[in-house]
Amino acid sequence: MRVKRLIHFMGDEWNLRPAGGATGEAYIAQQGEHKIFIKRNSSPFLAVLSAEGIVPKLLWTRRLENGDVITAQKWVSGRELKSPEMSQNRVAKLLSKIHQSEELLHMFMRMGNHPLSPHTLYDELRGKIGEMDIKDPYVMEGIQWLKKHIEGIDVGVKVVCHADVNHNNWIISEDNLYLIDWDGAIVADPALDLAPLLYLYIPKNKWENWLYEYGLNLNVNLQKRLRWYMVAQCVEAILWHWQRQEFHDISRWTDLLSQLFNETEFHLS
C-alpha cells in the first residue's frame, strides 16, 4: 500500500524500485536518464545535513495526505566505502565535522531529544535483556562489566552521533564523501561513534594518528570510554542477532566481547 501511494504521488512517468536498507522505506525514482533518491519519513534534520554537505543534496520535501513525509535527494553515483578505507583521513575529518556541528546539535535539542548518558544506555540494555529473558553468559558478563566500569565514563561534552558508522553507510562519489542513513541518530558522547569505528576498522597502532586527524588526543580517559561503549555495542549487537537467531553473527560479537574483557591499556606515545 505504501509503494502504491508513493507511485501515485510521483506519477506514472517515474519508475520506482527499492533502494535497499533495513527499513524498506527508500527508493530510487527514475525518469529517463534522471534519477533521484526518495525516502519516506526520513530524518527530520535532513535539511541541515544537506546544507552542511554531510548527505547528498536535499531537493524537496512533501507531506502526503496520510501524514507521511517524502524527501527527494540528488542521486549520487558512488559506492560504499570498503572496510580498509575507513582508516582514511577524510573519514576522520567528516566525522569530526559532524560532531562539531553546533547547528545540528541545536536542532536536535530543539526537537526535544535528551542526551544519552552511560547510565541510560546501561538501563536500556538491562531492560532489553530482561524482556528477552536471555541468560547467555557473555551477555550477562557484559552487562555486569558495564555496571562495574560505569563510574567516570560520563563526560560533559555531548554531540550529535550517527550511531551506526558501519562502512556501508559511508558513500564516496567522484568528489565527495557522505555519511547516510541518519534515522538512529542521537545526542551522546562522541565516543559512541568513535568506539565501533576504531575497534572494527582501525589497527590499534594507528588509533593515535587517526584521532589526531579527527582532532583528539588519545589519553587514558578516552581509552576507557571507547572500551566501555564498545562493550555496550557488543551486548546490543548480540541481543539484536539473538532476536533473529543469527548465530554466526552472535559468535562474531561474543569473540570481540571476550577480547574487550581481556584488554589491557595499550602504550601511548
Image (cartoon, helix red, strand yellow):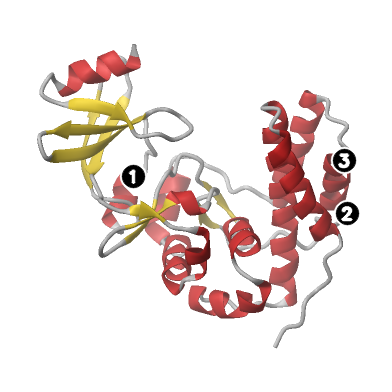
Residue furthest out toward the top? 1
Give the residue drawn at x 47%, y 49%. Answer: 168
Tell me the tag on residue 140.
Answer: 3
User: Crowding near pointer 2: few (<14 within 10 Å), some, many (20+)?
Assistant: few
57 to the left or right of 105: left
Question: In the rendering, at what x and y percent does residue 155 appear?
Answer: 67, 62
* Residue 19 image position (x, y, % from top left): 35, 34
| Residue 44 in the image, given as x and y percentages of width and height | 37, 39
Mark 2 highlights which residue?
A: 148
Mark 3: few/some/many CA within 10 Å (<14, 14-19, 20+): some
- Residue at screen point 24% across, 26% down: 16
Between circles 3 and 1, the one closer to the viewer is 3
- In primary-sequence order, the first of circles 3 and 1 is 1
Marks 2 and 1, the one that precedes in the sequence: 1
Question: Is mark 3 in CB contact (under 8 Å) with mark 1?
Answer: no
Residue 90 placement (x, y as % from top left) = 41, 70
Cα distance in 3D space between marks 2 and 3: 12 Å
Residue behind mark 1 = 46
Quarter in which the C terminus is drawn: bottom right
Q: Relative to residue 206, is residue 131 drawn left or right?
A: right
Type of amino acid at the residue the image marks with label 3: Met
In what element is the residue under mark 1? helix
Q: Are marks 2 and 3 in contact (CB under 8 Å)?
A: no
**Vertically, is 45 above or below 256?**
above
